[in-house]
Image: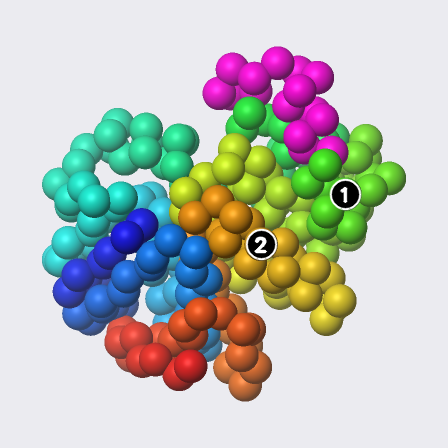
Amino acid sequence: MILELRGVWFERGADTILREVDLSLERGEILVVHGRSGVGKTTLAMIAALLLAPTRGRTVFMGSDVTGAGDQERSKLRLKHIGYVDQYSRLLPSLTLVDNVALPLRLMGVGREEARREASMLLERLGLKGLEERYPGEVSGGQRQRAAIARALVKKPRLVVADEPLSSLDDEARETVLSLLRDYVRERGAAALITTTELGVLYGGDREYMLSEGRLRRIA
Ligand SMILES: Nc1ncnc2c1ncn2[C@@H]1O[C@H](COP(=O)(O)OP(=O)(O)OP(=O)(O)O)[C@@H](O)[C@H]1O
């Protein structure tokens, strides 16, 4: 088991965003959470990525209960094991795509050339060959989105959490990303959680859920 959320609540002031959410992610699985704008998908994604602690309930990551873990312990786990793609596919504007994607490896101590080589390979698999030396401001939103996915995968994390990673992609690019994610989680025994505001389309995840009124309901 990679991640387990047990009876998780998230309350902010008088608002209850998540109510008694149970979710488990096993190795090799892709889980998709659908939901309208504002229902709490980002909140759930951030809890899954250990960026946010639930107000009630337990979080178990790779067999360890991290419910009461401090910031430092959680950030250590994140750096090593979790790739997070935020909703805005934020990249550093002053670095080219290849250097953005190579950055997590550089931070882990990998040499520049090797890190850039790994990054280029991933960019190519995501259909971005030829754009390696462009800056984020010189590519499209969908291309930035794919570069952000490459950046999350480059350090080969155990858990990939991607918040609305497909929103600016056409059908072909979307399929490219999903099939790369499928191959990735299967090959590496990793797991992925992705969110989407699309309600009527299934994404071919191993399990798909609808989040509404704070509760998760399985839809496929
Ligand atoms: N920092 C904050 N302070 C107060 N309320 C917040 C904050 N962040 C989010 N919210 C509220 O919490 C609720 C859940 O937000 P969240 O971002 O998790 O939703 P979402 O499903 O990801 O939405 P979207 O699809 O529009 O990104 C929303 O009603 C939002 O307005």
Disc number for residue 183:
2
Magenta residues? 106-120
Disc marking residue 42? none
Q: Is residue 113 magenta?
A: yes
What's the residue at 81%, 31% (across, down)? 133
Residue at the disc numbered 1: 124
Q: Amino acid at mark 2?
A: Asp
Residue at the location (50% across, 53% down)? 186
Crowding around mark 1 (Cα neighbors within 10 Å: few <14, some 14 to 19, many 20+) is some
Give the image location of residue 169, x and y in percent. Answer: 70, 64
Disc 1 to disc 2, C-alpha distance: 15 Å
Please, is residue 163 above or below residue 203 in the view?
A: above
**Where residue 175 sits in the image (x, y, percent)?**
68, 65
Amino acid type, mark 1? Glu
Nearer to us of marks 1 and 2 is: 2
**Secondary element at tag 2:** helix
Q: Main secondary structure of the magenta part?
A: helix
C-beta proximity under 8 Å, tags 1 and 2:
no
Q: Quadrant of the C terminus?
A: bottom left
Rendered location of residue 8, percent (x, y) = 19, 62
Q: Residue at x 67, y 50 (%)?
A: 146
Q: Is residue 163 above or below residue 98?
A: below
Q: Give the image location of residue 20, x and y in percent.
A: 17, 69
Q: Is residue 39 in view from this perspective?
A: yes
**Displayed quadrant of residue 170:** bottom right
Q: Secondary structure at mark 1?
A: helix
